[in-house]
Image (cartoon, rainbow, N blue to C red):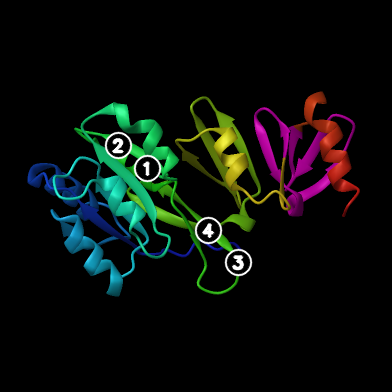
Amino acid sequence: MINLKRYCMHCLIVDDDDTSRKVIESFVEQTEDLDLAGSFGNPQEALQFLKKNPVDVILVDIEMPEMNGFDMVDSLQGNPSVIFITGKEKYAVEAFDKNAIDYLVKPVKYDRFINALEKVQLPDAVGDTKFIFVKSGSVLVKLDIYDIDYVESIGDYIGVHVGGKRYVVHTTMKEAEQKLPSEQFCRIHRSFIINFGRINQIEENTVSVVGKVLPISRTYRKNLMKRMNTF
């Protein structure tokens, strides 16, 4: 059964700039299934709050007077997803060195905010099943990764196909391939990643996935067949 249950994702905002913080607060307010757990101008106060109130994602400014965003992230307990916010692009490399899922440059636009949230991945409360969030209108839909049929490249976006529906996400095939569990998913073409559990049949240059015929490129065929030998 396809898991399309809606899930309320809890977020925390940390930014000493009142105007910038209120903009992000307004974005959270207009996004369904996104809950504002807290909003702070002081990172020390935010860290105290987090000790008793874990969240799924933290949106944190980098340049703050008492403690910068990098130092705050280094002090975090637990493993929430982190999205850095800053007025300068020069911090991008260091931001991703801190394993941030995204990096937003002020003034932040709503569409860019949503694109960042789409990259959040959460472990399920029970077991190791993982989920991703994808945008459907103004709603963030929580999808079980193992319900994905296949992923296709659409320029600067990808299409995530689940049970006959397609969700468009602003990310790359390379990032998708890295995030999807390799024991369950395989790249078969520069434009396609498939779920082994959804394969109907394989021919010389094509594979049928839930009735959809997809091409297998010469580059990826050898690896696909090698992987199939383990099933």
Real-space CA distance between mark 4 and mark 3, rounded to the nearest whole angstrom: 10 Å
* Mark 4 residue type: Phe
Q: Residue 116, which numbered label? A: 1
Which residue is label 4 attached to? 131
* Mark 1 residue type: Ala
Q: Residue 128, which numbered label? A: 3
N-term mark: 3 or 2: 2
Q: Are marks 1 and 2 in contact (CB under 8 Å)?
A: yes
The magenta stretch spans residue 212: yes
Is the magenta region chiefly helix, strand or loop?
Answer: strand
Real-space CA distance between mark 1 and mark 2, rounded to the nearest whole angstrom: 8 Å
Q: In which quadrant of the rendered image does the C terminus lie?
A: bottom right
231 versus 106 height, above or below: below
Q: Can you give x and y, in whole percent of width and height, for residue 46 in the image?
A: 21, 61
* Mark 2 residue type: Leu
Q: Is residue 42 found left or right of 198 in the rendered image?
A: left
Query: For numbered disc 3, what is the local secondary structure?
Result: loop
Q: Which residues are magenta?
A: 187-214
For the question of whether residue 38 can be seen, the reply is no
Query: For numbered disc 1, what is the local secondary structure?
Result: helix
